[in-house]
Image: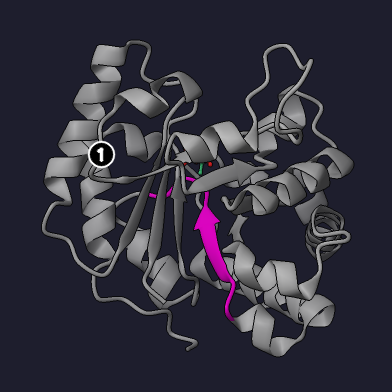
């Protein structure tokens, strides 16, 4: 599997001009990079305005395709704009917008139906980790997000699981590669339990949480994961390009 490097710009930059500048400098920086899949997830409003050259993803999506849902954006709208990916269940959406597991499950199913590759975020809080409940939290989030998603749908879905320990996001305290590896192995075991080993092995599991150019490679080579979800560092083009370049030629050490 090619490493997958996803940029989550969150609610940044604050102007279209800034978004175009950022997009174009990343595009220039990764122009000659081969064998790494780079996906940029800007705010919705910039999606149709950035121009081509890099794969696009959204940071959220609604679960219906059209109708009386003021303020929402549908999976078919994203698909129509050329989006390939959509982040679903980010911890900030769970925390600030009350997205519960049932909502995330609806969004996952809707994204798959529209032909978008969902990037499902799962991760434990600091408290869950301290109490030794990481596995329980991850399993609950994974199983409920994939409820009633059949094996045949999953196989064509391009689903990506992003392991994002909540305590590591934006904290400058990244998870150690060993701990990320443990979570990755656990998540893959859960996927194998749900869908069988063959299907589970085809799903990319990526890491997110205070990724930098310094630690980027370790999550692929040491933690045996298939890529990265990058928040803060994706707003700094030089740093982000270094992260992408750090993944060149890497394949996870477990395969
Ligand atoms: C994120 O929010 O998905 C994330 C990984 O953020 P950061 O890289 O800033 O920790």
Q: Position of residue 158 (x, y in %)?
A: 57, 64
Residue 209 within the segment the image draws in magenta: yes
In the depicted structure, whether residue 200 falls above or below residue 32 = below
| Circle 1: element type | loop
Q: Is residue 101 left or right of residue 242?
A: right
- Label 1 sits on residue: 52
Q: Can residue 122 be seen?
A: no
Residue situated in front as seen by the camera: 204 or 163: 204
Q: Quadrant of the N terminus?
A: bottom left
Task: Kindly indicate the quadrant of the structure image that contains residue 19.
Answer: top left
Residue 124 within the segment the image draws in magenta: no
Q: Is residue 129 left or right of residue 112?
A: right
Q: Residues within 10 Å of mark 1 (few under 14, many from 20)?
A: few
Q: Position of residue 203 (x, y in %)?
A: 59, 72
Q: Which stretch appears magenta?
A: 202-211
Q: Position of residue 25 (x, y in %)?
A: 16, 35
Q: Is residue 180 left or right of residue 147?
A: left
């Amino acid at each position: 599997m090619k490493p997958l490097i996803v940029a989550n710009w969150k609610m940044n930059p604050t102007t279209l001009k800034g978004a175009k500048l950022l997009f174009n400098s990343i595009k220039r920086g990764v122009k000659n990079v081969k064998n790494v899949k780079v996906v940029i997830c800007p705010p919705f409003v910039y999606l149709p305005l950035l121009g081509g050259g890099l794969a696009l993803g959204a940071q959220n999506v609604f679960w219906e395709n059209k109708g009386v849902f003021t303020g929402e954006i549908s999976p078919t709208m994203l698909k129509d704009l050329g989006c390939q990916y959509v982040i679903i269940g980010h911890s900030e959406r769970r925390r600030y917008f009350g997205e519960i597991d049932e909502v995330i499950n609806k969004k996952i199913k809707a994204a798959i139906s529209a032909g978008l590759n969902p990037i499902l975020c799962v991760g434990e809080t600091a408290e869950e980790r301290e109490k030794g409940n990481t596995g329980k939290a991850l399993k609950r989030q994974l199983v409920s997000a994939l409820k009633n998603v059949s094996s045949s749908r999953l196989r064509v879905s391009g689903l990506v699981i992003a392991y994002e320990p909540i305590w590591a996001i934006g904290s400058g305290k990244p998870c150690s590669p060993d701990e990320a590896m443990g979570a990755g192995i656990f998540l893959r075991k859960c996927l194998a339990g749900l869908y069988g080993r063959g299907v589970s092995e085809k799903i990319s599991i990526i890491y997110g949480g205070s990724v930098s150019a310094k630690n980027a490679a370790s999550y692929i080579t040491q933690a045996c994961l298939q890529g990265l979800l990058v928040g803060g560092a994706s707003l700094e083009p030089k740093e982000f390009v270094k992260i992408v370049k750090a993944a060149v030629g890497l394949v996870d050490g477990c395969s």
